[in-house]
Image: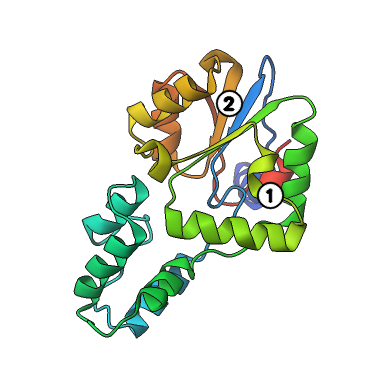
Amino acid sequence: MKLKSMLLNFLISPAKINKMKIDLTNIKNIIFDLGRVLLNLDFEASIKAFQELGLQTDVLDNKQAYSDPVFYELEVGKVSPKEFCSRVRKVLNNPEATDLQIENAWYAMILDIPKERVEVVQELSRNYNIYLFSNTNQIHIERLHGAFKAEFGFDFPSLFVKDFYSHEIHERKPDLISYQKVIELSGINPAESIFIDDLEKNIIGAQQAGLKTFWLKDGLEMAEIF
């Protein structure tokens, strides 16, 4: 009987994960991450695209660790898109690669923001202050904003009280100062705010800043946790 019970628990555990709900008791502010929370991503698409341009090693691994500092520098606004492309040409060892080819390869990982997630954010905004905090870069976010408006007919930032991007605030998760800056710029009370992210290290950083958190683990869908 004990073995049968253990097997039953194992078999139903994925369903339990899918039914996890977020606790919004005493919460006034919700801060969403972007990638793999609102936005679908395919890192392999960018890896493949860069390999087609001559890259011999992965531009990033399955832990989202970049192979060259220039990718991090772009994320915190230390280099411009043009400087980024110039550096990547050297990484690729391909002086013939154009800026457009490099930007296209870098953007290849960006997929879609499902309608269901947009609707959940809109519904939540009736009762909560909704914010966004993403590690991203000028190349990705400018194209994403354009693609979103073309699909939905309104501006992506209008979903939020304020959207914070690492390349604009010059800090990135999981560094403690990045959360502190978002808290300061938004004027929110961390004790009344919850941060939602798919990466454990980012959740830990947010907790260190005093924010309540929800870790959107693999198998969980943002549109189903509220």
Q: Secondary structure at mark 1?
A: loop
User: Along the line of sight, which residue is nearer the eye, 162 or 24?
Assistant: 162
Residue 210 picture location, percent across and down: 45, 18
User: Along the line of sight, which residue is nearer the eye, 156 or 114?
Assistant: 156
Residue 63 picture location, percent across and down: 36, 55
Q: Which residue is mark 2?
A: 194
Indicate the quadrant containing the N terminus: top left, top right, bottom left or bottom right: top right
Q: Quadrant of residue 60?
A: bottom left
Q: Secondary structure at mark 2?
A: strand
Three-letter amino acid code at the position of disc 2: Ile
Q: In this rendering, would 225 be left or right of 96?
A: right
Answer whether residue 20 is visible to the viewer in this image: yes
Image height of 219 relative to 206, above or below:
below
Q: Quadrant of residue 146?
A: bottom right
Q: Which residue is mark 1?
A: 155
Q: Quadrant of residue 181?
A: top left
Q: Residue at x 80, y 29 (%)?
A: 126
Three-letter amino acid code at the position of disc 1: Asp
Residue 43 picture location, percent across and down: 45, 65
